[in-house]
Image (tube, coloured by chain):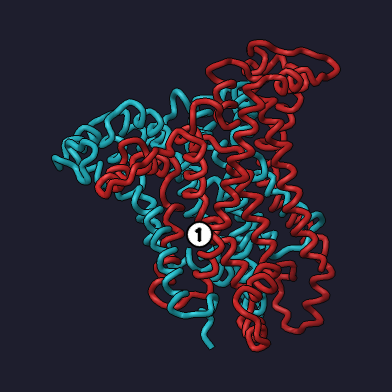
Chain colours: A cyan, B red
Amino acid sequence: MKLTWFLEHPALRRAVMLSFILAFGAFLILPLVTLLLWAFADRWFFPNLVPQVWGFRWWGWILENTDITKAARWSFLIAPTVTLLSAVICLPAAYAFARFEFPFKRFLYVALLASNAFPKLGLYIAIAALFFQFRLIGTFWGVVLVQLINTLVTMTWIPAAGFSSVPRELEEAARDLGASPLRVFFTVTLPIAMPGVIVAMILVFLGSLDEAQATLLIGAPNIITMPVQMYTLVGNYPEPVGAIFSILLTVPSLILLVLARKFLVSGYLAAGFK
Amino acid sequence: MSQTASSSPSPAARKLGRLVHSWREPVLGLLLVLPPIIVLILLVLYPALEALRFSLGFVPADNPAYASGLDLVNSNSGSLEVFKKLFASSFFSSNLALTLRVSFVSVLLLVLVSYPLALFARFGRGKLAGVARVLYLLPMFVPVVIATYALITFFGDNGWLEAILGTVGIPYHSVIRQEAGIVLGHVWVGVPFAVLMLSSGLDGISNESLEAARDQGANAWVVFWRILLPLNVVPLLIVMTFSFIGVFGSYTVPYMLGPSAPQMLGVSMALNFGAFRQPQQAVAMAVVSFVFCAFAGALYVWSTTRGRKS
């Protein structure tokens, strides 16, 4: 039996669903298309539907602008640092949550959620005040630390779901054949749990590239990443500049999306919350 | 991992080994989970507590960011003076009202858009369902700042939408720099999380239970209300809680898409902390938003623990 029977009449159902998806698709995609058009517009006056003059005039300007290349450098220094640091801190915990029994396990697991349960800007302000005290404002490590907060749940819960999906029998079989615990971990457990770890790392990396609020508050004026740069670009430069910059900023995400598509649809994203 | 290193294939010996080393597992487990918990305590709980103390009038002399603020309320025994002033200010109450309104409307719209998508992603067949499954993930890969900028160029004054509607003579009034603009932005940004959560919950509902209801003659509406919704209530609550907290504490979306007055609390907090040099007011607003979001969080914790018991 088919399961697409939510509305009783197939034709009607299809029409309703089609128009819903079309409307939703337009809502999601058309703003991005507008940006794309702006990125290749040398001149575009309202109410023309497409630019009057197409061109690449602003691309050269952007790629030569030192502020922007500096921002790109900071972004691509900070994102991998945050991802690696978060992995070092959280992955052993994820394994412990999945495999060990210890006191307060359930409580500690849920407690991590506190990092997501505070309204973000309020928390960032409280942290900014603390970082003033420790002279971390405007420093690389200040930004890395503040971004670390948002990674705790992702980097613990999703890999934990991955680790607990590894059948214990498999590990025990490997032990029976004489493999050491470490060897079992690296040759049996980790490879099977890898999709969860990869999804978590991708999400953390993207989250760091995307982060603007905390980075602005903690990093300014020395550490300006690409999204923070975007705040100033939007108000002070013509549309094509913001549009081109947007494309440059979205490219890494899209590359990761394509690379990780297989893992992303496999349900790991929501795994931790169950 | 708590077994002896010797390879002992018999289950009895293995069990003995586990017993002997039973203390190792709890200690090792606690040690391994310690690092993220320490980060949580140092970077979330401690600053939040300091903020709370500061808002109650305990001004830490060794913290220049707090101690150098203007209009400080100083108290050795704690006072609610800052909050009294805050709630007496008409700016704050209209900001708070706006924040609550935007949060509720955004969450409502988000659920209304995401639920059909999640149902379609879970139960739909064919090309269209495949398209939908990729489509809803898209905003996850667009940085929020970029998303808001894209929305401005499309929905804003003299934007593409106005140009398109103009060709067929439909008048359009821009939603950008309005309350509606903030809601629009949050729905755009929030869809992937909401749909992922909801459809992962729907994955757990077996086709058999739906078919059984179907055989009993239940129509789609009944199936939705009696089976899908009750069985999927925890993911729904998660979506509502976390979207609410996310919208409530947001900065980028209201900063880019919202009106300059009244403002969402996040924008107002940042201004008070930075430009206005009134950290105590900013921190008090943060405390107020912690309290509101604590209610939302409590709802989530209550619902998940209840689900676990039954």
| B21 or A262, nearer to the observer | A262
Q: Is residue A72 above or below residue B114?
A: above
Rendering coords of residue B93 (x, y %):
66, 27
| B200 or B94, nearer to the observer | B94
Q: In which quarter of the image is the C terminus of chain A?
A: bottom right
Residue A261 quadrant: bottom left
Residue count near mark 1 (Cα–Cα under 10 Å), binned few <14, some 14–19, many ≥20: many
Q: In this view, does A267 lie above or below B173?
A: below
Rendering coords of residue B261 (x, y %):
53, 25
Please state the total of marks drawn on the protein image: 1
Residue A171 quadrant: bottom right
Q: In this view, does B15 lie above or below A127?
A: below
Q: Is mark 1 on a helix, strand or loop?
A: helix
Rendering coords of residue A176 (x, y %):
66, 80
Rendering coords of residue A149 (x, y %):
60, 42
Q: Can residue A34 be seen in this view?
A: no
Residue B293 quadrant: top right
> Looking at the picture, which amino acid does disc 1 mark?
Val
- At x 53%, y 35%, the residue is B251
- At x 74%, y 22%, the residue is B83
Q: In this view, does B37 lie to the left or right of B120?
A: right
Q: In this view, does B117 lie to the left or right of A58?
A: right
- At x 58%, y 15%, the residue is B277
| A63 or B174, nearer to the observer | B174
Q: Name the residue under label 1.
A: A199
